[in-house]
Image (cartoon, grey):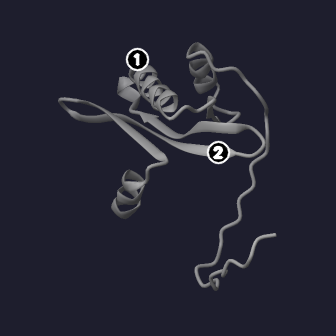
């Protein structure tokens, strides 16, 4: 986890914001910049956690506002966030932050073996 975090912190297309109290970390948000051919430049919130004891105290709102300010600074067209269909409380939270439901989709994942030979880029056409 520490190695993954250090790589994210070094990346210029990643944003991490952490919320804390005197007792320690109570929330964090990770977002990334993506330039998508179909939909343009956007920031996608890829993770956000607020400890259960600190929910409903504006911590999540402040984390979102931080990501939105970063998105404006890098001139993104939009901020996108995905939420599991079963997490209805988070849906209400994002609506309250001004987000609108844009689509419902299935997500597919395929773990890759660690022993794949690297692909050598060839000439582009």
Q: Nearer the viewer, residue 87 or 117?
A: 117
Select label 1 or label 2 by which is in front: 2
Q: Position of residue 32 (x, y in %)?
A: 53, 44
Q: Position of residue 107 (x, y in %)?
A: 74, 49
Relative side of 31 to 100, left or right: left
| Label 1 Cα crowd, 10 Å radius (few <14 / some 14-19 / many 20+) | few
Residue furthest to the left in view is 22
Q: Position of residue 72 (x, y in %)?
A: 51, 27
Q: Quadrant of residue 102?
A: top right
Q: Nearer the viewer, residue 102 or 124?
A: 124
Q: Which residue is mark 1?
A: 58
Residue at 45% x, 32% y: name it: 70
Above or below residue 7? Residue 74 is above
Residue at 64% x, 45% y: name it: 35
Q: Which residue is mark 2?
A: 35
| Label 2 Cα crowd, 10 Å radius (few <14 / some 14-19 / many 20+) | few
Relative side of 35 to 2, left or right: right
State the quadrant of the C terminus: bottom right
Q: CA distance from mark 1 to mark 2?
A: 30 Å
Above or below residue 60? Residue 31 is below
Identify the disc placed on residue 4.
Answer: none
Q: Secondary structure at mark 2?
A: strand
State the quadrant of the N terminus: bottom left
Relative side of 110 to 96, left or right: right
Residue at 40% x, 17% y: name it: 58
Q: Quadrant of residue 34?
A: top right
Relative side of 59 to 80, left or right: left
């Amino acid at each position: 986890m520490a190695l993954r975090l250090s790589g994210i912190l070094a990346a210029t297309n990643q944003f991490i914001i952490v919320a804390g109290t005197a007792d320690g970390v109570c929330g964090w948000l990770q977002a990334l910049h993506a330039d998508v051919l179909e939909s343009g430049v956007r920031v996608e919130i890829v993770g956000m956690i607020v400890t259960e004891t600190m929910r409903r105290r504006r911590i999540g709102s402040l984390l979102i506002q931080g990501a939105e300010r970063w998105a404006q600074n890098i001139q993104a067209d939009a901020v996108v966030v995905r939420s599991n269909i079963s997490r209805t409380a988070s849906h209400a939270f994002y609506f309250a932050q001004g987000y609108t439901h844009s689509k419902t989709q299935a997500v597919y994942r395929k773990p890759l073996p660690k022993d794949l030979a690297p692909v050598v880029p060839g000439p582009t056409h």
